[in-house]
Amino acid sequence: MDLSAKFTFVIACWAVTFITVADCAIYPSETSGDSARKLPSAVIPVSQPSTLGSFYSLSLSSTFPEDLNEYCIELLRIYRQRYVAYANCLVTYARPVKVCQNCYTGFNSLDGIYKNISSDQPGPGNISCHDSLMRSDRLMLLYALFNKLDEIWTSAKCKQCLSKDQEALSNDTVYFMATLNQSLSCFEQYQRNHTELCKDCKASYRKLKELYGSMDKNQTLCIDLEDAMNITQQLWSKNFSCLLPREETVPVIAVSSFMLFLPIIFYLSSFLHSEQKKRKLIHRK
């Protein structure tokens, strides 16, 4: 072996020895007895286990003092229960729409507890929960939640189908539902014979349409009645292919015919009148 080869061999052995010693100094527990190297794993400093543990288990509710008294907590619990009950009623009677006739009790209960919370009048023990529940943060969650459901109730015009105290259905609503059931019962009776259906159910269906028109003028319709009438009209015209001739068709045709022949009558009378003028003209001799 020449001098250069010996020098290279010595340098290589020195480098391997240096790396092994350094590796054992940094990760002594990861080197086995036969000097086999292992990959280092993620190391968390053992000097601060409690600091990291307390950081990841931080709970805001445990660090802030309770700012609600028992009376306000009870109001919040009642609000939650009634809100869930009313929202569940809306979803249950979404199709076909029957929210006004089935959910007015839930809305009245929710409206009552909301007015109690939002009122400035103190409750038992001269305690008012208005500021702590309604204005304690920028989100004002109780107000926002109630406002959304109140918009649905208002857009459905449910008040027009209820009594003045909103504790029961109005007499007009009950009468409309009874008239509607008469038409639906007739449809069901002649469902397999559309020809007889269109003939025998015409009177009850006409009565229903007239009642619906009068209630529309009196503003006593809500979404329940509107949706029920739309479904009934689709059954009558689309499913059963029935037609209901309008009573005002004959007067409309008569007036239209008169207006059509009016110019002809005008020009004819003008022509006859001009001929009479010519006959009365006297020529001078």
Image (cartoon, grey):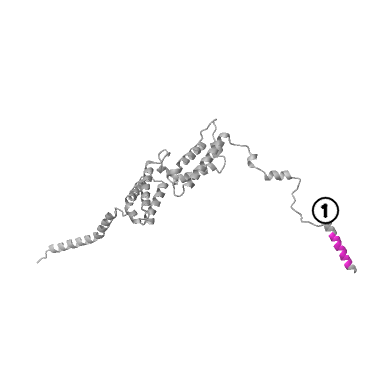
Q: Which residue is mark 1?
A: 25
Q: List x then y, in percent, for residue 271.
A: 19, 63
| Amino acid type, mark 1 | Ala
The relative height of residue 101 versus residue 275 in the rendered view (above or below) is above
Q: List x then y, in percent, for residue 55.
A: 69, 44
- How many numbered marks does the figure carry? 1
Residue 225 left/right relative to 40 = left
Q: List x then y, in percent, for residue 195.
A: 33, 56
- Whether residue 140 is visible to the viewer of this picture, yes or no, is no
Residue at 88% x, 63% y is: 10
Taken as a whole, is the magenta stretch helix, strand or loop?
helix
Task: Give the magenta-colored segment's residue range.
Answer: 5-16
Residue at 88% x, 65% y is: 7
Residue 37 colored magenta?
Answer: no
Q: Quadrant of the N terminus?
A: bottom right
Q: Quadrant of the C terminus?
A: bottom left
Q: Quadrant of residue 61?
A: top right
Which residue is farthest top?
A: 125
Q: Residues within 10 Å of mark 1 (few under 14, many from 20)?
A: few
The residue lying toward the viewer, choosing from 69 and 80, is 80
Residue 14 colored magenta?
Answer: yes
Which residue is farthest left?
A: 285
Residue 257 left/right relative to 4 = left
Residue at 72% x, 44% y is: 51
The residue lying toward the viewer, choosing from 63 and 184, is 184
Residue at 40% x, 43% y is: 161
Disc 1 is placed on an element classified as helix
Which residue is farthest bottom?
A: 2
Q: List x then y, in percent, for residue 221.
A: 39, 46
- Whether residue 6 is visible to the viewer of this picture, yes or no, is yes
